Amino acid sequence: MTDAFISHAPDDIEWVRWVAERLRQEALTVSYEESLRSPGELKVDVIENAIQNAAHGILVFSKAALRDRWVRETYATLIRRSVENGQRLIPVVIEAVTLPDFARNRFSIDLSGADGPDRDSRLEELIRALRGQPPIPAAPPDDETRPDRPRHRRRVIIAAVAAGIAVVVVAVTVAVLGPFDWRDPDVVDGDRAKPSNATQPAVVGDVRKADPCSMLDAKVLARFGDTRIDTNYGEFDRCDVLVSKKDSGHAVAHVNLNFVSKLIGPGSVRRTQEGHVAVGEPQSRAKECAQNLLLADGNQVLIRAKQLESPAPDPCALAQVATDHAVTVLNRGPVPERPVPFPANSLANIDACALLDDAALSVIPGISAHDPERDFANWGCEWRSTTANAGVDLEFSQDDDLTDNGQPTRLGGRRSYVAPEDRTCVVHMEHRSYTDAVGEPTIEVVMVTVDGPQPNKALCDTAEALATAVAKKLPKP
């Protein structure tokens, strides 16, 4: 058995030869069409046999690959293998293209435009994935005694837990594949974050009323230390419990729960049906552990636990206790509603995808305002260019302090902070300030992130222009 089969377009053969040789240097065995040619044998039989005898599949994405009918047939076979046998599919992007849904719902490796050390580090991600090793963890912040409020879109936060961990793909049965369909068989109907029958168990109901904190209970987790719940920590669909040493007030771990409307992550996990909820087996890495719950309406709940320092409770024990409680709540009925509705001027009542139109997004070629990827309840939106490796993220979040989020400025009459990062620029723009239920100051924030190949100044100019356009459509604080 080989470590991987590489699916690619004929135009990309030079790149495939190069990466195959690099993988062989790492003692990994790979196969691809050219390496399998044998005069007189049927091509389809040879390829099918190679896929059957590969532990993983590498899908090379380029403009030529997306046009090639034979490549699409190969993708279909790899998807079927992933569903039936748990073969990991690893999308590798070598040219700026818009990925089909089934690939966008998996963590990909972007080698487009990469060179030198940058290319080597990204290739190392592929090597580690093929070996079944976790990604090299990022260096922790200087002070990890209290979890920082999230600064990036949730899919990035989830990646920190799930990269290299099969967190959320649901196994479904695939019959004989007919004409190739770019839709991921695991995401049949796309975004499921829609109101559902609120009388049924294990459904979200009204997405803007569903209370994530109704499924977390600080008392249930009290066996691990002193606990307190935080209802305004990050995104609107998130709830957290902080775990501290007894009588110290010093957080050593935390558990958070998020609603998720789309399947995220590579591979597949074994699930156990508990009443109306399909419970994914725990997925752990280093100091973190995650469990995923698939609800009766197709929405999901992601529960994650993390050690902030040592000694601290076992994160998988924390996640399991939290999961058991959430399943109990869900099997009683629909997700309970929030005890207090969002104020009329809250960002939670706004469709993030409606805040940027074609005119505003025209600053980035190849983006259409009518083709976004939507987050749960439309509290976040992403647009990708079809002609360049560039895009825009717009997300609503909450924080207690923005002063460490970049250079202060005013955009559209609102206090904002601009921070260039690696091939991106992020704008945090204040919407409204209030005091939360436990007396802590909290800020509703619009985050605009622009990524692309341009220099940081150009990216930040674009991000500021987009944030200014957003500010014009926001209600008064």
Image (cartoon, helix red, strand yellow):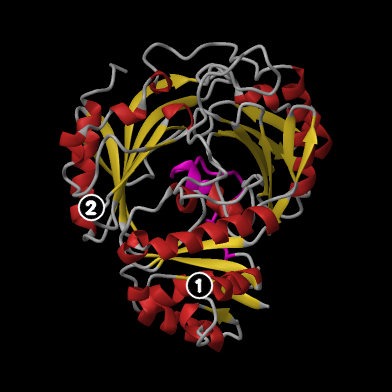
106 or 390, nearer to the observer? 106
Residue range in magenta is 135-157
Magenta stretch contains residue 143:
yes
Residue at the extreme right of the image, as rendered? 223
**Residue beneath the point at 52% across and 85% down:** 40
Amino acid type, callout 2? Leu
Amino acid type, callout 1? Ile
**Residue beneath the point at 53% across and 27% down:** 232
Residue receiving disc 1: 6
433 or 101, nearer to the observer? 101
In the rendered image, which quarter is residue 378 located in?
A: top left
Circle 1 crowding by C-alpha within 10 Å: few under 14, some 14–19, many from 20: many
- The reply to whether residue 146 is in sight is yes
Q: Quadrant of the N terminus?
A: bottom right
Q: Residue 54, position in %: x, y?
A: 63, 72
Residue 459: assigned label: 2
**Residue beneath the point at 66% across and 30% down:** 295
